[in-house]
């Protein structure tokens, strides 16, 4: 379902610059007013105090003084009206890295989850890095083999937060050799766009589902919508895939992509 009043998504491949020019994280500062509330969600992390504190420090350095860290560890906490209100009062929600299954299993279907969607669908900003990037789509990658060719039944998928439809997002993409696993996910459902985001790289998704590339590396797009054939349904478990006729784009900063029409644009 498409919402006409979507906000903005900033989806980061992980390991973004926090000490130099902070090009990606600075996007939040440029989109928010000085007194807008920014909420940092550390649910994915095993070291939430450390991670939350670091991001709060970086955002303060970039001029965002009104930042709060919420470490939601249980579904009881996620369902509390107080947590829901704190998130709804935010103009921007930032989801840290860690384990994406912690995010969805703890937040899914709760007051906190509904509040995140309300922020986005009322015109706010939702940012996520690493695991926080994977959860943006309606279906997310949970686990798969790095540095291996595409194989059937080696990719584990689960429902995401459903802020972006018809896409699968993978992160730390080139650095961890994840082309094969993303290709597997897209070959199993060719209507879905595969978006592989490198470290220190992000896509900024506008309300009309156009995104631009930000950062120092590359976003790889795997488009199987016009493939001629594949053996994904014929292979035995762990069989190596053959996919004929895929379209692959590698886009650096200065380029964007129209997701509705599947077209590359130079900015």
Image (spheres, rainbow, N blue to C red):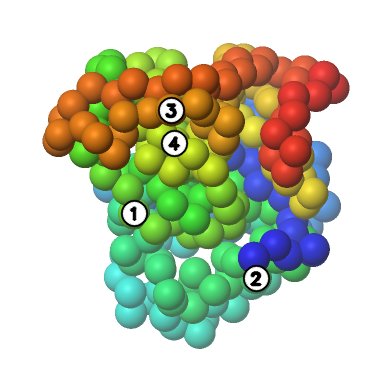
**Quadrant position of residue 35:** bottom right
What element does badge 4 sit on? helix
How far apart marks 2 and 3 lie (CA) works out to 40 Å
Residue beneath the point at 33% across and 79% down: 76
Nearer the observer, 59 or 107: 107
Residue beneath the point at 43% across and 52% down: 139
Label 2 sits on residue: 118
How far apart marks 1 and 2 lie (CA) works out to 22 Å
Nearer the observer, 153 or 95: 153
Placement of 91 over or under 256, stated as above or below: below
How far apart marks 1 and 4 lie (CA) works out to 14 Å
Label 1 sits on residue: 158
- Earlier along the polypeptide chain: callout 1 or callout 4? 1
In the image: residue 26, left or right of residue 33 = left
Residue beneath the point at 40% across and 16% down: 175
Placement of 88 over or under 129, stated as above or below: below
- Earlier along the polypeptide chain: callout 4 or callout 2? 2
Looking at the image, can residue 154 be seen? no
Placement of 198 over or under 163, stated as above or below: above
Residue 262: x and y in percent read: 70, 34
How far apart marks 4 and 2 lie (CA) works out to 29 Å
What element does badge 2 sit on? helix
Residue 229's label in the rendered image is: 3
- Earlier along the polypeptide chain: callout 3 or callout 4? 4
- Earlier along the polypeptide chain: callout 1 or callout 2? 2
Residue 145's label in the rendered image is: none
Residue 169: x and y in percent read: 49, 38
Label 4 sits on residue: 186
Are the residues at dot 1 and dot 2 in contact (C-beta closer than 8 Å)?
no
């Amino acid at each position: 379902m498409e919402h006409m009043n979507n906000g903005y998504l900033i989806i980061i491949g992980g390991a973004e610059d926090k000490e130099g020019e902070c090009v990606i994280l600075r996007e939040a500062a440029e989109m928010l007013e000085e007194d807008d509330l920014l909420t940092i969600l550390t649910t994915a992390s095993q070291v939430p105090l450390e991670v939350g504190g670091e991001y709060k420090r970086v955002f303060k350095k970039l001029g965002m003084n009104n930042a709060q860290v919420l470490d939601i560890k249980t579904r009881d906490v996620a369902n509390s009206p107080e947590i829901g209100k704190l998130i709804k009062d935010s103009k921007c929600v930032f989801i840290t890295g860690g384990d994406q299954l912690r995010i969805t299993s703890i937040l899914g279907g709760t007051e906190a989850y509904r509040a995140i969607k309300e922020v986005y669908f009322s015109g706010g900003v939702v940012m996520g890095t690493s695991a926080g990037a994977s959860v943006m789509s309606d279906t997310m990658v949970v686990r798969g083999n790095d540095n291996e060719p595409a194989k059937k039944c080696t990719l584990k998928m689960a429902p995401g937060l459903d802020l972006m439809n018809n896409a699968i997002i993978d992160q730390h993409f080139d650095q961890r050799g994840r082309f094969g696993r993303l290709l597997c996910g897209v070959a199993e459902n060719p209507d879905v766009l595969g978006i592989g985001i490198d470290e220190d790289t992000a896509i900024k998704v506008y309300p009309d589902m156009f995104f631009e590339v930000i950062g120092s590396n590359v976003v790889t797009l795997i488009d199987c919508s016009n493939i001629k054939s594949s053996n994904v349904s014929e292979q035995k478990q762990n069989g190596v895939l053959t996919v004929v006729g895929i379209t692959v784009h590698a886009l650096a900063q200065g380029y964007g992509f129209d997701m509705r029409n599947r077209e590359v644009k130079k900015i």
